[in-house]
Structures are given as C-alpha cells and as structure tokens.
Amino acid sequence: MLLKKHFAWLALVFCAANFACADTIQLKDAAAVTGKILAEKSDSVVVDVGYTVLVIPRSAVEKISKVNEVLSPAASVVSPLLNVAPQFYTATALASPARDVSSLVKQIGEAVVQVRTPEGLGSGFFINADGYLITNFHVIEGETEISVEVYRQLDGQLDRETYKQVKIIAINKFHDLALLHIEDKNAPKFKWVTLGSSDALSVGDPVFAIGSPLGLERTVTQGIISTKTRELEGELYLQTSTQINPGNSGGPLFNLAGEVVGVTNMKITFGEGLGFAIPVELVKNFLDHRDAFAYSTDNPNNPYRYLPPPNYTKQKPDGK
C-alpha cells in the first residue's frame, strides 16, 4: 500500500569445550552444529547448544554423529568456527523473551528505513549490515529511481541520511516482496533485524509496526495478531489490529522479542484495525531462493529467473 496508489544458524555453531563429547550435526553448507540432540523428528532435529535450543530442518542436515561416533574424514577437517559461510540474514525459530516496546524501538528502530521513489514512498528494513533490505514489490514497481532514507541515533538525536545508489536485487510480485541493496561507496555498516517465526505466533499475541504512514517517518503502532490465516486473493496473510496506513508498506511487523514476524503491505480502507502482513516464512523462502527471483533489466516484469541447465544436459557440437 503506497502513497501513490536459511534458517540462519544464529548460534553460528559455537563449539565450546563443554561440548567436546557432544553430538555433532554436519550441515550441507560445510558448517556444523555441536550440542545435545534432544529430539529427532521426520522433518527436523532439535539440538541444545547450551544457551538456546535450535530446530534444524532435515533438509539442511548432511550427517549426524552422536557421542563416541567418528566423523568422516571430510567432516573431521571442518572447523565449525572458521568455515561458516557468511550468513545473508539472521533468523531464529524460537522466540526470545518478551520486552517492552519502548526499549525495542530504541534498539532496532535504526534498522527500519523509508523507501522513496518519484511517485511515492514506503518502508523497509535491513536484513544484514551490508545494506540489503526488504520492502514491498508494489513500493518500487515500475520505478527506475529509488532512494533510501536511514535514521541514526547520534547524541540522542535522529540523524537522517539519504542513499540514492539503490539496486533492485530480486522481486516476487506474487508475494509482494522486493530485495534492494544500497550501493553507495561510502555507505557504512547498517543496523539490521532478526527474522523470527510467524508459525510460532498465536492469535492474540501482541505485535508492533514501525514505518512511515502517510510520510510520517518513525511512526510506531501496536496491536495484536487477529488471525494467522486470512486468505485474500489466494494468499494467506497475518491479520493484525496494528494500524497500517499508506507508507507503512514494506515495513516490519515485530513480535515483543523484537523479531520480524511479517512485512506489512495493506489494509482494508473502509475499516479500522484491519491491517495485513506477509508472513515472515515467505520472506525467508524468498531470500533463500533469491537467485530464482533475481531482477532482470532485460525483462523487469518477470518475477522469476530461470537458471541455465546443468552442463550434462547440453549436447556437444557433434551431437554426442
């Protein structure tokens, strides 16, 4: 709604000395998680890593080595601390303890930005320190000139800075999502937010939004989850009583742990307290498969990018 109309391994597999004889879950990305396996399910493995519990999807697991079992030679040379690939975003499957909205806004508010185009504006939020941010597709749809306004706390005051070198990385117009990147040469590291779990939400859970409704930047609104499965035009949305207005589009919907559980994108205009957000699980899927959604200047309206087939499917010049 615009004015113009990996599971990330949060624990980062810290293998402390007290886990020297613990179970090891070898991951497909060459990293590993060391801890005590609490449960093995058909679709996931639950691991106690000492200070939190991780739920690891089975699809990400290469091998499980329990206490007294020997790792394969290839796995034994992997240093879980030195060979972890940089994470594109950070996510957690289990909600952290609840806090008050005021302290959370002070902590994570700088990660929420305003996305401007010649035709209007929306909101967005950083998912990592390197300037990658999420917003709604309809905020930047058809636009070639995009700027991002970032707000920083300096000496108790908000300092606004505008970045105009913004690139569209990926789009999914069916789920109304866009991934942008600030490419200004002198851009610093940015504050970012953690992606939570919309699956862990319950009806009645308190949530809050930060955005720029009607251009009023840094606006905070609070409400509850009204329903988790509101179907609109064939898609399921989180319905919330949190006030959502034009300009909130693309902004984060937070739980009281300060984790993003949804991306606000629309409201019913003839009612009050009827706002909607895209579940964060769809955001994670979009980010995990961003290559398939890569924005193409050759066909900017195409929300999908089809990668070239593997070499073994290509015939040699002689037909063999």
Image (cartoon, rainbow, N blue to C red):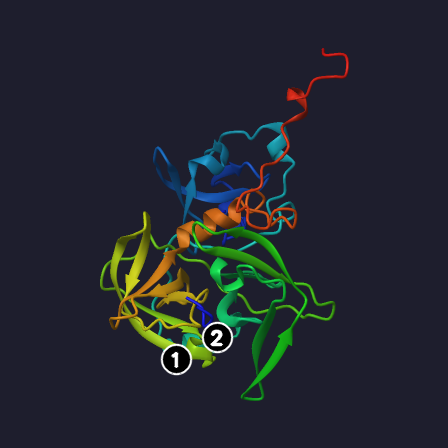
Disc 2 element: helix
Give the vertical position of 168 relative to 15 (above or below). Answer: below
* Residue type of the residue flagged with mark 2: Gly
Q: Residues within 10 Å of mark 1 (few under 14, many from 20)?
A: few
**Image disc number at residue 280:** none
Given residues 16 and 200, the one toward you in this image is 200
Residue 192 seen in this snapshot: yes
* Residue type of the residue flagged with mark 1: Ser
| Left or right, residue 80 beside residue 223 | right
Residue drawn at (59%, 81%), measured in percent from left and top? 160
Give the vertical position of 9 relative to 120 (above or below). Answer: above
Rendered location of residue 289, percent (x, y)? 53, 44
The quadrant of the image that shows the C terminus is top right
Given residues 161 and 108, the one toward you in this image is 161
Label 1, label 2: how far apart the Cα atoms are: 10 Å
The quadrant of the image that shows the N terminus is bottom left
Give the vertical position of 290 relative to 63 (above or below). Answer: below
| Left or right, residue 79 beside residue 281 | right
Rendered location of residue 88, percent (x, y)? 57, 53
Rendered location of residue 250, percent (x, y)? 46, 64
**Image disc number at residue 109:** 2
| Left or right, residue 119 beside residue 248 | right
Residue drawn at (54%, 29%), measured in percent from left and top? 70
Give the vertical position of 95 relative to 221 (above or below). Answer: above
Rendered location of residue 85, percent (x, y)? 62, 47
**Image disc number at residue 102:** 1
